[in-house]
Image (cartoon, grey):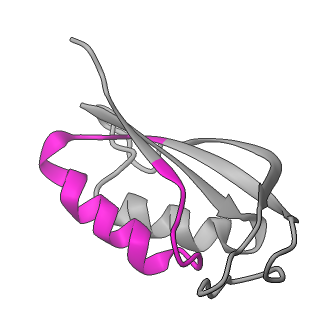
C-alpha cells in the first residue's frame, strides 16, 4: 500500500481528485474516493524555458493550492500516476509517493 500526496491549484482540485480516485486511488475496505485535503499557499519561480500554468517568468509567484492525500494499492499505482499527470494543469506537478509499512 502507498500514500500519494499531491499539490493542486484550488481551481483544479475536484478534477484531479476525481481522476486519481476513478483510476483506483482512495479505496479502503467497502469504501472508495477516501481522501484528505488541506489548503495552503505554494510558491515557485519559473526560469527561462518554463511554460507555467500560471505566474510570470523570473518572478516568485504564489498560488492557492490544496494538498490531497490518498491511499493507493500497489496494483493501481501506475494507473493512478498516469491519471494524476494527465489531469493536473502544471507542467511538472509536485507529488510524493510513500510506501506504507505493514
Residue nearer the viewer, 99 or 69: 99
Q: Quadrant of the C terminus?
A: top left
Check the image and name the residue furthest to the top: 102
Tell me if residue 19 is in the magenta stretch: no
User: Over which residues does the magenta segment extend?
Assistant: 70-95
> Residue at point 54% right, 56% down?
94
Residue 28 is situated, as x and y percent measured from the top left of the image, at: 33, 34
Q: Is residue 56 above or below residue 42?
A: below
Residue 68 is situated, as x and y percent measured from the top left of the image, at: 59, 47
Q: Is residue 41 above or below residue 99?
A: below
Q: Could you say which quadrant of the image residue 89 lies in?
A: bottom right
Residue nearer the viewer, 18 or 101: 101
Q: Is residue 29 above or below residue 31?
A: above
Residue nearer the viewer, 53 or 87: 53
Judge from the rendering whether residue 35 lies leftward or rightward of residue 32; answer left or right. right
Residue 75 is situated, as x and y percent measured from the top left of the image, at: 12, 48
Q: Is residue 50 above or below residue 60?
A: below
Judge from the rendering whether residue 12 lies leftward or rightward of residue 93; answer left or right. right
Q: Quadrant of the N terminus?
A: top left
Amino acid at each position: 500500500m502507498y500514500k500519494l500526496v499531491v499539490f493542486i491549484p484550488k481551481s483544479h482540485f475536484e478534477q484531479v481528485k476525481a481522476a486519481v480516485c476513478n483510476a483506483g486511488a482512495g479505496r479502503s475496505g467497502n469504501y472508495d474516493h477516501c481522501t484528505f485535503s488541506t489548503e495552503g499557499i505554494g510558491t515557485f519561480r519559473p526560469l527561462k524555458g518554463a511554460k507555467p500554468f500560471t505566474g510570470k517568468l523570473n518572478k516568485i509567484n504564489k498560488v492557492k493550492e490544496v494538498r490531497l492525500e490518498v491511499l493507493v494499492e500497489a496494483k493501481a499505482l501506475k494507473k493512478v500516476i498516469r491519471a494524476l499527470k494527465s489531469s493536473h494543469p502544471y507542467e511538472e506537478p509536485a507529488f510524493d509517493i510513500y510506501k506504507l509499512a505493514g
